[in-house]
Image (cartoon, coloured by chain):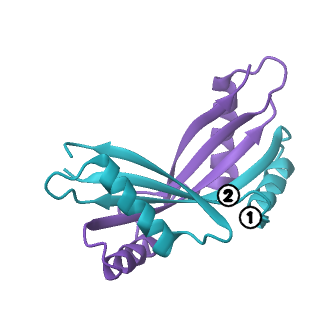
Chain colours: A cyan, B purple
Amino acid sequence: MAIEVDVTIKLKHGVADPEGENTKKALNLLGFKTVHGVKSMKTFRIEVEPEKARGEEEVKKEVEEMCRKLLANPVIHEYEIHVVTSESG
Amino acid sequence: MAIEVDVTIKLKHGVADPEGENTKKALNLLGFKTVHGVKSMKTFRIEVEPEKARGEEEVKKEVEEMCRKLLANPVIHEYEIHVVTSESG
């Protein structure tokens, strides 16, 4: 009955991503020469209890507020929100 | 012309996730009382250069090898592989 929402926090274009760069280097050294770039991102799967008749749109709006208030840093991050499962609003 | 593949590394069921738990607590304290659980995951977006006639399946197999060799720890992690963009194999 819960709604699961995936929030992907990624770095804005132009922000340095040393973790991704080093992962790319390590993959290249391991022999994966076709890897041209790696970007690291963080994903939170948030389980939200749906109250009464809250729809998917309302939950999405709430999760967006969570990103603004806690999960993402607007200076360097951008985020994507995807509802994964939603059994009855 | 490059293929982008998303690799999501998540903790196996039963493995402690203090980051997720603390995120849940913080969200609850901020007033998001409907949040019942948060799982933290790591995503790598890997850009692979397609050589000659390599198809999506072959790229997926290669990325799976990357997970086994570097990205994931089989003791505590499981992973999902999704091809995001694929313009001509």
Secondary structure category for the residue under label 2: strand
Chain letter belonging to callout 2: A
Q: Is residue A69 above or below residue A86?
A: below
Q: Quadrant of residue A35?
A: top right
Q: Which mark is residue B42?
A: none
x 23%, y 53%: residue:
A2
Q: Is the residue under label 2 in contact with that under label 1 (CB below 8 Å)?
A: yes
Please indicate, yes or no, whether residue B4 appears anywhere in the rendered image.
Answer: yes
Q: Quadrant of residue B37?
A: bottom left
- Tell me the residue that label 1 is attached to: A19
Q: Taking B72 as reference, is A48 left or right?
A: left
Q: Position of residue A68 (x, y in %)?
A: 50, 69
- Tell me the residue that label 2 is attached to: A40
Furthest toward the bottom, the residue is: B29
Sort mark 1 into few (<14), some (14-19) or many (20+) by Cα contacts within 10 Å.
Answer: some
Secondary structure category for the residue under label 1: helix
x 60%, y 72%: residue:
A73
Q: Position of residue B46 (x, y in %)?
A: 71, 45
Q: Position of residue B51 (x, y in %)?
A: 84, 25
Q: Position of residue A51 (x, y in %)?
A: 17, 59
Chain letter belonging to callout 1: A
Q: In 3D space, how far apart are the residues under numbered discs 1 and 2 (Cα atoms)?
A: 6 Å
